[in-house]
Image: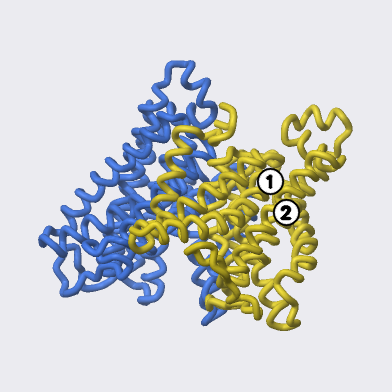
Chain colours: A blue, B yellow
Amino acid sequence: MAAEALGGLALGALLVVPPFLPPYFLEVLISVMLFGYLGAAWNILGGYAGQFSFGHAAYFGIGAYTSTLLFLRFGVTPWLGMLAGGVLAAAFGLGAGYLSFRYGLRGPYFSLVTLAFAEMLRVITVNTKAVGSSLGLVIPNREAAPANFVFAGKLAYYYVILAMVLAAVWITWRVARSKLGYALLAIRENEDAAEASGVDVLGMKLRAMAISSLLTAFGGTFYAQYFAYIDPTITFGPSVSIQGLLQAIVGGAGTVLGPLVGAFVLTPVSELSRAAIRGRAGVDVMLYGLVLILVISFLPKGVMGWVSRWR
Amino acid sequence: MTADLLLQGTVSGLLLGGVYGLVACGLSLIFGVLRIINFAHGAVMMLAMYTTYWLFALCGIDPYLSILITAPLFFIVGMLIQRTVIEPNRFAAEHNQLLLTLGLALFLENLALVLWQGDFRTVRPTYAGASFMVGEALVEVPRLAACGAAIVLAVVLFAFLRTTDVGKAIRAVSEEPEGAMLMGIDIGRIRAVAFGIGSACVAVAGALVTPFFYVAPDVGESFNLMAFVVVVLGGMGNFVGALFGGFIVGLAESLGATLLPGSLKQLIVFALFVLVLLLRPAGLFGSARGR
């Protein structure tokens, strides 16, 4: 009961408080939500199925580039582009996943191959003039047009990403309680035993992959629309992949709310450190590295694992 | 496409391949004993390159001479990293150990960024521009020296592992940890020593490339990625394979640069990486184990 009341209170605060926040805090909150969202998307494959992708930037980038290119070249509204990017990313994820799982890549080998796939997309994008090469793409004309995913103020973007986060959390919750969720946990804990017990290991992993990559691509479109600028390093670079998994690991991989909790812990750490030490790039990521080491050493199940010990 | 260009590409590729081989030997040794893929390997190389840079810039110590300082220094740094960060988590899940080294890499790289900013620094001793011609191919002396020294060091290391007691203990732990423990080998110490030697390897590789490479906080990343490719090619934990894999990757990268425009050469390396991972995860020279 207490947990539900707390959850309801938190949700109410997330809905009601933001219009009264000063611009800076609203921006930070949007970052929290975006990272939490990416963490939730990663969590379905990484946390529940235990397949540690180091290459989710591939799906993020496909989402960002698909919607942006469709809009710039053909005037297709990014709302539709978002769907197209999601489908394309899921298709890419299924292809990459099928190859990796079919050939039995597990653990660190899976991590390495996903990293390689994302890096290949980055190199291709850098070298392709038609998609803006290393200069990236700018979305011009920022007059408010909600039909084209362009809003007048930051508040509207906040509610969009909040809705996306709630949807991702809801999907995670549904997956966790479904047959798929139990199969994924079985695969995570012992793949051979799951296989022997008649779990369709390949099929289940691919389903997790499809959901995870689709959601990640939506995040890419949101990023492109919110910042109005994308380039190969921002979207396909390793730091995007690391961001997603970091939120989930710190908050608690394989828990419904873990990634969001992780984002609420990590983003303020990075913002505060950047404010405290101005003019020095890298302080925030340095602290991320430190937090990652400390969390794995002292809270291997993340913040959620620590919370559940006290309940 | 002229034959000269291809010859030049082959020479450059083989010379850089030796360095990749040495970086990969260190990575492979650490993997063999500790069973973790060390994402912080490139970051250690970067720190060694900065050490070489500062020794040259502040004390005027020649990059090659500085190896006498960097090698033992980073042997100790490696042992300390292993003792303080990795050993306490040796029973943690495999993926958590992987993330541990990733966290370490993020920390070290960005520490360097905070301390020394992102500017590219170079070490240019008097012989930096020295070169000679072999047929139509230009051979830069520092690159040749780096490759030669890397091969020599790899051979010395190989002999060390084959003949000395510590070397034999390292191989025993890498092949059969429990058996090694029953034979009275102090596994914790051997794990630390292996991490130290692996770090010293990559530190020497870092010192060897500074006369012809730039020094920057993220310089280790590309070497680390190459070393992953090399180690996968040569077979995880396979020492000789790592050296040969280095030459294959160096060659693939360099010929890719000759044949393809822009930075598409990296595509060749990644494609090779994915293919080997999918088709021969135990490496080109390995047995079926390793999945």
Subunit ID for the residue under disc 1: B
Question: Residue A259 versus residue B228: which sits nearer the camera?
Answer: B228
Please name the residue shown 18% across and 54% down the image.
Answer: A81
The residue to which callout 2 is attached is B153
Q: Quadrant of residue A230?
A: bottom left
In percent of the image, x 72 and y 69: which residue is there?
B64
Residue at which label 1 appears: B30
User: In this picture, is A249 found above or below B110?
Assistant: above
Q: Amino acid at mark 2?
A: Leu
Q: Is residue B108 left or right of residue A179?
A: right
Q: Quadrant of the N terminus of chain B?
A: bottom left
Chain at tag 2? B
Looking at the picture, tell me which residue is in the foreground, B233 or B89: B233
Report the front residue among B120 and A139: B120
**Are discs 2 and 1 less than 8 Å apart at CB?**
no
Label 2 and label 1 in one chain: yes
Q: Position of residue A192 (x, y in %)?
A: 52, 22
